[in-house]
Image (cartoon, rainbow, N blue to C red):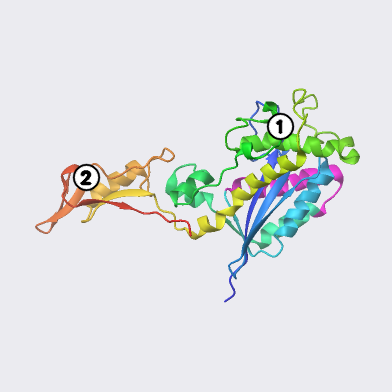
C-alpha cells in the first residue's frame, strides 16, 4: 500500500485593521490578512524539505496570489498536518479568500481553497496535545513534552534594521508570533513602497481598516528587506519543521506519572481522575499531577488503600518520546 504524501502547513498573518493595542478575534477573518505561509513535505522515500512564501505587497490581488500559491504547494499532498489548523489556518485560508476575492472580483481562489480542504486528509495535532498536556498547549510546549527541542529565531542574527516600534516583545529576544504580526506589516510596507501598483492600493483595503494608523517616523528607515524576509522565513519554517516528528510521537502521553506497581482500587481511580482529568493532568496548563492520595495493594484477596508516601511499591514512571 502506497504511503500518503504528507505536507505540514502553517500561515502567518497581519492585522492592519486593528490598532497596535487591540487583540484580534482569532476566528474572525475580517481582523486578519494573509502575510505568508510555510509548507513542508514528507515524501514516502524519507526526504523532507520546506518552502516559505510571502505576500508581495498590500492589496487584494497580492493576497489572493499568495493564497493560490499555497494551494498549489499543497496540490500533491494527500495529508495535511497542522497545529491548530482547524482553529486558525484553514479558517483564514478560506475566510481571506472570500473577503479578498469580493474586493478584487476573483472567485476562483475561494473555490480552490474549499476544494483543497474537502479533498485533503487534515490532521490537526493541537486537540490531542491539549487532551494530553493541558487545556491549551502551545506548539513549543507540545514539542518539549515529547522530547523535541523547539527551534527559536534569534533576531540579533539578522541585520534587519527594524526599529523598536516594529516589535511587540523586543528586538533582542526570540521572535514570537505577536512580533511577526507587526514585523509583517513593516515588511509589506517596505515591499509596497518599492512597487508603484501595490502602493497605489493603500496599506489595507478592508472597510474596517484604521486608515490613520501609522508606525512612528523612522520605523522603516534603514530596514533591509532581504534580511527581514530571511528572519521571517526562519521563523515560519520552524513552525512546520517538526510537525512530522510531533505527529509520529502520537499517541501523546502526559510526560510524568506516578502510579503504584500494584493494582489500584476503583474508588481511588475515580477520585484521582475526577481531580486530575482522564489523562492524569491537572486543569492548569503544563502542571504535572500524580496520584498522591492513595495507592493500593492486594491484601488477603481484597484491595486496600494506603497513603502513597507509605506504600513500599510506588514507583515513578516517565513516558516521553524523543526526537528521531
Picture coordinates of residue 141, whole percent (x, y): 48, 44
Residue at horizontal 19 percent and vertical 42 percent from the top: 309
Is residue 271 located in the magenta-colored stretch of the structure? no
Q: Can residue 102 be seen by looking at this rendering?
A: no
Res. 192 image quadrant: top right
Specify which label sits upstream in the sequence, 2 or 1. Answer: 1
Q: Is residue 159 above or below residue 312?
A: above
In this view, the residue farthest toward the left is 300
Res. 272 image quadrant: top left
Picture coordinates of residue 157, whole percent (x, y): 63, 40
Picture coordinates of residue 133, whole percent (x, y): 43, 46
Picture coordinates of residue 132, whole percent (x, y): 43, 49
Residue bearing the label numbered 1: 162
Circle 1 sits in a helix, a strand or a loop, which is it? loop
- Measure the C-alpha gap from mark 2 to mark 1: 57 Å
Residue at horizontal 37 percent and vertical 54 percent from the top: 319
Residue bearing the label numbered 2: 294
Q: Which residues are magenta?
A: 84-108
Amino acid at each position: 500500500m502506497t504511503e500518503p504524501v504528507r505536507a505540514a502547513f502553517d500561515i502567518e498573518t497581519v492585522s492592519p485593521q486593528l490598532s497596535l493595542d487591540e487583540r484580534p478575534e482569532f476566528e474572525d477573518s475580517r481582523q486578519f490578512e494573509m502575510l505568508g505561509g510555510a509548507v513542508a513535505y514528507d515524501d514516502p522515500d524519507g526526504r523532507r524539505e520546506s518552502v516559505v512564501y510571502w505576500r508581495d505587497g498590500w492589496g487584494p490581488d497580492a493576497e489572493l496570489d499568495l493564497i493560490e500559491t499555497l494551494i498549489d504547494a499543497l496540490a500533491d499532498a494527500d495529508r495535511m498536518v497542522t497545529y491548530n489548523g482547524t482553529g486558525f489556518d484553514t479558517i483564514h485560508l478560506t475566510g481571506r479568500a472570500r473577503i479578498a476575492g469580493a474586493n478584487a472580483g476573483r472567485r476562483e481562489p475561494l473555490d480552490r481553497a474549499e476544494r483543497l480542504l474537502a479533498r485533503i486528509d487534515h490532521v490537526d495535532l493541537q486537540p490531542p496535545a491539549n487532551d494530553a498536556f493541558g487545556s491549551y498547549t502551545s506548539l513549543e510546549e507540545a514539542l518539549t513534552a515529547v522530547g523535541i527541542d523547539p527551534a527559536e529565531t534569534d533576531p540579533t542574527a539578522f541585520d534587519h534594521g527594524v526599529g523598536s516600534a516594529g516589535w511587540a516583545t523586543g528586538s533582542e529576544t526570540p521572535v514570537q508570533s505577536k512580533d511577526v504580526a507587526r514585523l509583517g506589516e513593516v515588511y509589506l510596507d517596505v515591499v509596497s513602497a518599492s512597487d508603484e501598483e501595490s502602493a497605489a492600493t493603500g496599506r489595507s483595503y478592508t472597510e474596517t481598516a484604521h486608515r490613520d494608523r501609522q508606525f512612528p517616523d523612522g520605523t522603516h528607515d534603514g530596514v533591509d528587506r532581504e534580511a527581514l524576509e530571511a528572519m521571517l522565513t526562519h521563523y515560519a519554517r520552524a513552525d512546520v519543521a517538526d510537525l512530522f516528528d510531533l505527529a509520529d510521537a502520537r499517541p501523546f502521553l502526559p510526560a510524568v506519572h506516578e502510579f503504584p506497581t500494584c493494582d489500584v482500587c476503583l474508588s481511588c481511580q475515580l477520585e484521582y481522575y475526577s481531580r486530575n482529568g482522564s489523562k492524569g493532568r491537572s486543569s492548569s496548563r503544563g502542571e504535572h499531577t500524580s496520584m498522591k492520595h492513595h495507592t493500593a495493594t492486594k491484601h488477603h484477596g481484597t484491595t486496600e488503600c494506603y497513603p502513597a508516601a507509605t506504600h513500599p511499591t510506588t514507583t515513578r514512571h516517565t513516558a516521553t518520546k524523543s526526537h528521531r
